[in-house]
Amino acid sequence: MSKRDFLSTADLGRSELDDLLDLAARAKGKRPGQVLGGKTLGLLFFQPSLRTRVSFEVAMVQLGGHCINLSSDDLYELEPRDQAVMDGPAEEHVKDAARTLSRYVDALGIRSAQRAGSWDRERQELLLRSYAKYASVPVINLETSFEHPCQALADVMTMRENLVTLKGRRLTLLWCNHPEPKSLGPTHSILQMAALMGMNVTLAHPLGFEVDQDVLDRSKKLAQDAGGSVQVQNDMDTAARGAEVLYARSWGCTKYWEDAEREAMVKRSLQGWRVDEKLMATTDNALLMHPLPVRRNVVATDAVLDGPRSVIYDQAANRTHVQKALLMQLLK
Ligand code: CP
């Protein structure tokens, strides 16, 4: 039987997503027991993490298994390109690392959200896809610059807990200013998963911060098929008005992906793109969501992050439960 990876929101159809969310809800209510006793998950972090790392470790422990964590400091520099002549800094090919790790662990998780050249190159998720190609065990995307599907699972679980049904609900995905260029992964993944759930999604950003066109096209199609919609809005106030969920998040400019200074210059006039009480008051008593980490009083004010409609810690907590469900499905 061939192994199954979880690299993208596209790896789940609607009924599979519903099954996984139902399993996660059951796993949250009552621990499933030691169903993954003796299993090992290898986690490779090429970027920092708090939530992803800890929630996967806790998920495996609750299921009776355990994790091995490696960071880029522990690993040789890796070459992801096929047939590369390895006379540069890379000491090991992903092919060899992935095949070797597959002899030790039962699944692999990989975080590789980093700037590695142009957006055209970045969107190919070379390191993740190369691991998936050569590993003989399931590979899980722990975030690339293109997708963060585990975060989106937790986001959808959190929305379901609060709104019960998601079809037709108004979700605004709001770009917020941030001093650093950020991954598009969380935005791309929740956009597609919310569309799959039939939500009416407004994607709000200033001109120049468009998401990947293929992701936007796919989201529109998914929403249409599910009875929802996806629209783009370049005015923050219009986008927030009447929202039932306001999801704040910054993301980088794909046009200047290789030029962080240029992006910073563009963002100087965009400091008004942040969530505060005034903006929240224009919504339909919206839930406030953010995947964390968040720059307080830059992306969103303390008052809203600590306010009664904020579900940011529920999103983080639900990472453990959706990942237990995912691990059970991939490793059973
Ligand atoms: N949201 C999220 O993935 O958090 P970490 O970067 O801390 O893992």
Image (cartoon, rainbow, N blue to C red):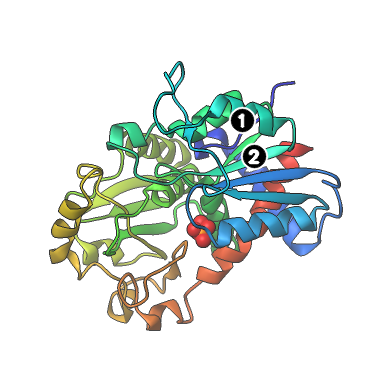
Q: What element carries label 2?
A: strand
Q: Is mark 1 on a helix, strand or loop?
A: helix
In this view of the protein, which residue sits in the foreground, 287 or 11?
A: 11
Mark 1 is on which residue type? Ala
Q: Image point 72% across, 56% down: which residue?
A: 59
Q: Image point 27% across, 61% down: which residue?
A: 239
Query: Eyeballing the image, is 279 above or below 178?
Result: below
Q: Image point 53% across, 38% down: which residue?
A: 76
Query: Eyeballing the image, is 23 above or below 122?
Result: below
Counting labels gives 2
| Residue 188 visible at all | yes
Left or right of residue 133, residue 25 in this image = right
Image x and y of residue 115, in percent: 34, 44
- First in sequence, mark 1 or 2: give its number: 1
User: Cβ–Cβ below 8 Å for labels 1 and 2?
Assistant: yes
**Image quadrant for the N terminus?**
top right
In this view of the protein, which residue sits in the foreground, 78 or 135?
A: 78
Question: Residue furthest toward the top?
Answer: 83
Left or right of residue 137, residue 190 in this image = left
Q: Which mark is residue 98?
A: 1
Which residue is under mark 2?
108
Q: Local crowd at mark 2 within 10 Å, few (<14), some, or many (≥20)? A: many
**Image quadrant for the C terminus?**
top right
Q: Residue 199 carries which label?
A: none
Q: Which quarter of the figure has residue 251?
A: bottom left
Image x and y of residue 180, in percent: 30, 60
| Residue 165 visible at all | no
